[in-house]
Each structure stands twice: as structure tokens, then as C-alpha cells.
Image (cartoon, rainbow, N blue to C red):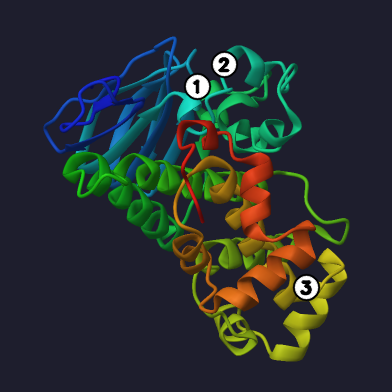
Amino acid sequence: MDSATIDRKNPAWIIPLTQARAREGASLDASKADDRFWIVLVLSGTALARVDGRASAFSAPALFCLNEREGFDLVEGKSLDVRVLSFHPSIVNSSFDFANIRAGGEGLPLSSSQDLFWFAPFIERDEGGNPGRAARLEIGPLTAERVARIVEAVAGQIEGQPDEGWPCRSRSYLIELLFLLQRIRQATAASGFPDAAEDAAGMEKVILYLYENYSRKVTIGELASAFNTNRTTIMGAFSKATGTSIKDYLIGIRVRFAASLIRDTMLPLSEIMERVGFNDFPHFSKTFRERVGCPPSEYRQRNCWMLSMYPDYRD
């Protein structure tokens, strides 16, 4: 598997992000590499793989987040469809490398350290547990479909390179995927809300649903139907578990993701607005300002590390 993608129109522009696909009968070796994180998504089939050197059997859907010290070697499988992304953390922010990520952001500016949480699924491990199990995130079919759509979007950009904006757009899709992976990890973690375990688990699933669908309109009725309850019950349980309403929580997701894209890409603010589920720019700008303390354009001027590469950029 290649280690980077080269801009076909400007070979000097190299993006440390690649993708690959393996179906039944094909080999897949995401061997240990000192300069890559790996996302391995198994969409169908059953398989036996060596994860960080240890045998691991699993069936689809399965999702692995591997760091530069680990590896994934597909030994054998049946009816397999596997997607792989590999990337260096500098694609998210040029300040990032494996050393400062593992050091908890030591020496990084505050605007950069805010994004370190994205790498938790790749870095944080239970040292006493099975490495393969620690690297695996538990997902269901709907979550697998959501992850697959984002992976396809990344692949479409780096393979097709449809316009000059493909490097930023491929980065934006990767950031969206990292955003979702962190929430999946939190949703399946042993710790949760301080209520009873079954209540915490129920709300974690609702939160994950919001993360999977924040880019479109989500109604309370839809949530009640999806989780086999009624509007009053789900609103009350959510408020008790999180301390906020479903609407406010959803807005928070949208603004947080928008801030990530503003910090780490040069995508137009109008495109970012649509990506995170807003359809009216004045409303988006007002909501962002209320939550973050300044309008989106000012936030980019203060925090976007890419601005130095585009001195003539105007929102």
C-alpha cells in the first residue's frame, strides 16, 4: 500500500493519506510502519487476522484503529470486503507528529492541542488487555454504513482529484471520520453517565445516533421511534443524563465539528455550514458566535494553521 497520494497536476504536492480495498482472495497487510495510523473497516465476511502480532478472529462489521507501532495482517477470510485508510497525523494539522501526540500535546499551541482527542482511538490502549481487542471499536451495521460512506468520500477525492480543492476536501472527510471514531470509542467505553449502567448505555446510543446524523434534520419523534420509546421519556432521560436538551446537544455537535473544519481546512465557510447541518448562513454565524465567542470568519483568522499558505485568502 502506498504511503502517500500525489497531486497529478502538481507532483510536488504530496498528501500523507492513502486508501485501499481488499475483497475475498486478496491479501491485505497493513504492516507496522513508523509513520502511519491505520483505519481498517471490514464491511462483510469473516476473517482471521494478526493484529499487532496476535491472532484475532472476527466477523463483519468490524473496525480497527491502529497506531504506528501496531500492524494488521489479514491471514484468511471468507466473503470479505475490507477498506483501509492510512494517514500521517500531520495531514490534520502540520504541527502534529507521533511524539507530541503521545506527549499529550506538549509544546503545541492551544488551537492545535484542542484536536488531540481525535487520536485517542489510535493511541490509548489497555496495557493489560488484548492489543487486538483494544484496537477494535465495536460497531453495528448502521454505523458501519456511515463509516463506509465517509471512507468512500475520501477515496473519491484522492482517486478522482476532481478539482484543486481535493486535498482540503479529502482532509475534511478524514476529520469527519476521526470525529465519529472518537464518539464510537466513547459510546462503547466501560465508563459512561453516572446513572445505572443500562440507562447510560441507552443514552450513549442516542448520542452516537446524533453523531451519525448531525448533518441532517433529526426530530424528537424520529429518535423516539428509533429507540422504541416516546418523546417525553427520551427527552427526560437525555436531559437527566447529559444536563442539556437533545436540541442543544445536537447544535453543540454541529458547532464543534464546524470549528474543527474551520481550524484545519480552507474549505469555504458556506460549504462547512452545509456539511454540519445548517442551511442558513446568518443563523450558522449567529449560533457559532454564541457557542464559540466569535463569528466563523474571525475564528479562522485566529486559529487556522493553513492561512499562512494562502495569504490572499478571503472568506
- Looking at the image, do the residues carrying marks 2 and 1 touch, with CB atoms under 8 Å apart? yes
- Viewed as shown, does residue 43 lie left or right of 178? left
- Say which residue label 2 marks: 98
Classify 10 Å Cα crowding around label 3: few (below 14), some (14-19), many (20 and above).
many
Residue 157 x, y percent position in the rendering: 26, 46
Tell me residue 51's x, y (percent).
42, 22
Q: Disc 1 marks which amino acid?
A: Asn
Query: To which residue does mark 1 refer?
Result: 67
What residue is drawn where x is 28% and y is 40%?
83
Q: Which residue is mark 3?
A: 238
Tell me where residue 70 appears, x and y as whole percent.
Answer: 46, 16
The mark nearer the N terminus, 3 or 1, is: 1
Work out how far the residue at label 3 is from the one at label 1, CA to CA, in angstroms: 34 Å
Is residue 59 in sight in this rendering? no
* Element under disc 2: helix
SS state under label 1: loop
Q: How far apart are the two marked residues, 2 and 3, measured between alpha carbons?
A: 37 Å
